[in-house]
Amino acid sequence: MKHPFPRFKHPIAILTGTTASGKTSSALEFCSNHPEIEIVNADSVLIYQGLNIGSAKPTPEEQKQVKHHLIDQCTPDHLYTAAQFIEDILPILIDIEKRKKRALIVGGTGFYLKALLFGMWEQVNASPELRNHLESLDAKVLYEKLKQVDPVAADKIGPTDHYRLVRANEVFETSGKTPTEHQSAQNTTPHPDFTLLILDRPQDELLKRVQKRAQLMIENGWIEEVESLIKQYPNSRALHSVGYAQIIQFLEGKPPSGRKLKPGIQGVIDEVVIATRQLIKAQRTWFRGQFDGQWIILDEEKQLLIDSLEKIYPSGVQV
């Protein structure tokens, strides 16, 4: 399969890693000495307007400090896909290069990064009738349907992810090929102009950062942000993201299965931390399984990060 991206004049770094590892602050710090760099977001939650506090979205001041792209692209009631991300990011990267600037991609959404590095198989669009029929079916029914034709995809998705089960079944029923067959036709080597830098931290330190960040987000009005969003966008899938989903459960008075919550705000913070820990574990597994990138442990390897970025964006070099 041909990669959807052309060759670029200059290499482009993708700065990714676990939640709370310091991707945004590291990027901003490096860019402060490199005015030619513009940051391109690759985080699925930052795409949405209004999801500001819980997404750790760069502040308006930070976005003035360094030009950012692909932030606040759409409202939370819009379903923004990896295919849309690829469609949107390509003209941005071309334009940045045309203006003699440099792009630095920052974010940790695995599907976006995989599409960047390896491309995507052709988008399959189902008829509205088929989509409506599949969406009317229970997740377990969809899971069994998929398992009959593509057990590999079914095992990856699991029996509870209704959205992805609908999508996988409609891919097969529309194209006659299973998701696994489509994926097997993808590129096996990444685009040569992208360099992947994966940030992480020692587990104890990372968990302290997660705890502190959750506490600070609550103090800064995260619960009020969620209350406003669910009034405006009650059916938004974006509000199923980690952290937002836990606050919605708290607001709806739905305790977690098998756990007793501490009373008040501390119980919400604990749930956000637990969900974020699970996300970090999944992120690490994803990065190790999907990508051949350079792992950098902060803060002990901060100089390694700077040196690695300087190789891609050397100071004083004419663009």
Image (spheres, rainbow, N blue to C red):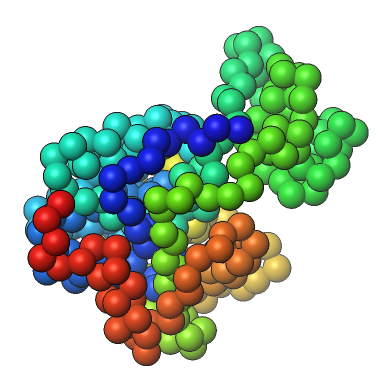
Q: In this view, does 51 lie to the left or right of 65?
A: right
Comparing 46 with 14, the one in front is 14
Q: Residue at x 29, y 63 (%)?
A: 312
Q: In this view, does 138 lie above or below 106?
A: above
Can residue 159 be seen here? The reply is: no
Q: Which residue is drawn at 55% across and 32% down?
A: 2
Residue 45 lies, in percent from the top left, at 39, 48
Residue 241 lies, in percent from the top left, at 48, 51
Q: In this view, does 65 lie above or below 152?
A: below
Comparing 50 with 301, the one in front is 301
Among the 4 quarters of the image, the one containing residue 133: top right
Among the 4 quarters of the image, the one containing residue 212: bottom left
Can residue 284 be seen here? The reply is: yes
**Residue positioned most to the right:** 148
Comparing 104 with 157, the one in front is 104
Q: Residue at x 57, y 25 (%)?
A: 123
Residue 93 lies, in percent from the top left, at 28, 40
Residue 206 lies, in percent from the top left, at 44, 80
Q: In this view, does 91 lie to the left or right of 166?
A: left
Q: Residue at x 15, y 52 (%)?
A: 319
Quarter of the rendering occupied by the N terminus: top right
Q: Is residue 174 above or below residue 88?
A: above
Comparing 88 with 148, the one in front is 88
Among the 4 quarters of the image, the one containing residue 36: bottom left
Q: How many labels does the image show?
A: 0
